[in-house]
């Protein structure tokens, strides 16, 4: 079994509570399940197979809870040098709409490029670990 790393990363970046992604061990492709459709086609039979848990045929890709972007934000903050930027970012991630405030503060502090590099690396790590756990060869 093999998969393009970019396909896994794309799926991970679009996953949410309404969209799920699976890897088909048979076709070796990433499938998007959204609104009763599979990759944009009505395929209720396939959705039923997946929902019935035929895990040997369809492996779920990391979802939003597996990715845990909040923890990524925390880890990014703790890797910054101690000081004003770290303190300000720690404060903005507490409470509601933390991600929006975090992004706004990143721009104010000029750290957005550093964050996006950190986040991309973290997503890649999650994707690689998922492939390794499922014995799926990565195509770069």
Image (cartoon, rainbow, N blue to C red):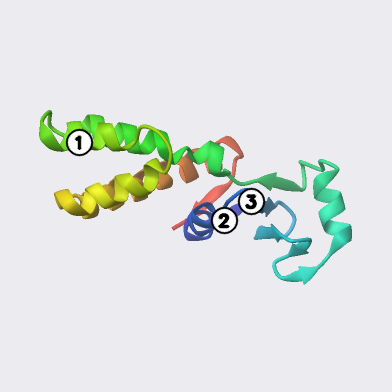
In-image side of 85 versus 30 (left or right): left
Q: Is residue 59 above or below residue 33?
A: above
Mark 2 burial class by Cα count in 10 Å: few <14, some 14-19, many 20+: some
Q: Which residue is mark 3?
A: 1
Taking the spot 50% from the left edge, 59% from the top edge, the residue there is 10
Give the structural element (helix, strand or loop) at label 3: loop
Mark 1 burial class by Cα count in 10 Å: few <14, some 14-19, many 20+: some
Mark 3 burial class by Cα count in 10 Å: few <14, some 14-19, many 20+: some
Q: Nearer the viewer, residue 54 or 105?
A: 105
Give the residue furthest to the front.
Answer: 96
Give the structural element (helix, strand or loop) at label 1: helix
Residue 57 spot, x, y in % from top left: 77, 48
Label pair 3/2, CB-CB below 8 angstroms: yes
Q: Which residue is mark 2?
A: 3
Residue 47 spot, x, y in % from top left: 82, 55
Say which quadrant the C terminus sits in: bottom left
Q: Nearer the viewer, mark 2 or mark 1?
A: 1
Q: Nearer the viewer, residue 11 or 89?
A: 89
> Does residue 101 appear in this view?
yes
Taking the spot 60% from the left edge, 40% from the top edge, the residue there is 135
Residue 66 spot, x, y in % from top left: 54, 37
Q: Nearer the viewer, residue 76 or 121?
A: 76
Badge number at residue 88: 1
């Amino acid at each position: 079994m093999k998969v393009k790393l970019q396909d896994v990363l794309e799926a991970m970046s679009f996953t949410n509570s309404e969209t799920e992604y699976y890897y088909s061990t048979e076709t070796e492709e990433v499938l998007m399940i959204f609104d009763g459709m599979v990759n944009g086609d009505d395929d209720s039979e396939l959705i039923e197979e997946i929902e019935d848990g035929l895990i040997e045929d369809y492996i779920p890709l990391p979802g939003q809870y597996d990715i845990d972007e909040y923890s990524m934000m925390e880890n990014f903050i703790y890797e910054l040098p101690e000081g004003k930027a770290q303190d300000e970012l720690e404060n903005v991630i507490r409470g509601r709409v933390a991600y929006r405030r975090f992004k706004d503060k990143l721009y104010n502090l000029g750290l957005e490029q550093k964050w996006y590099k950190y986040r991309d690396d973290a997503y890649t790590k999650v994707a690689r670990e998922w492939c390794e756990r499922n014995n799926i060869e990565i195509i770069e």
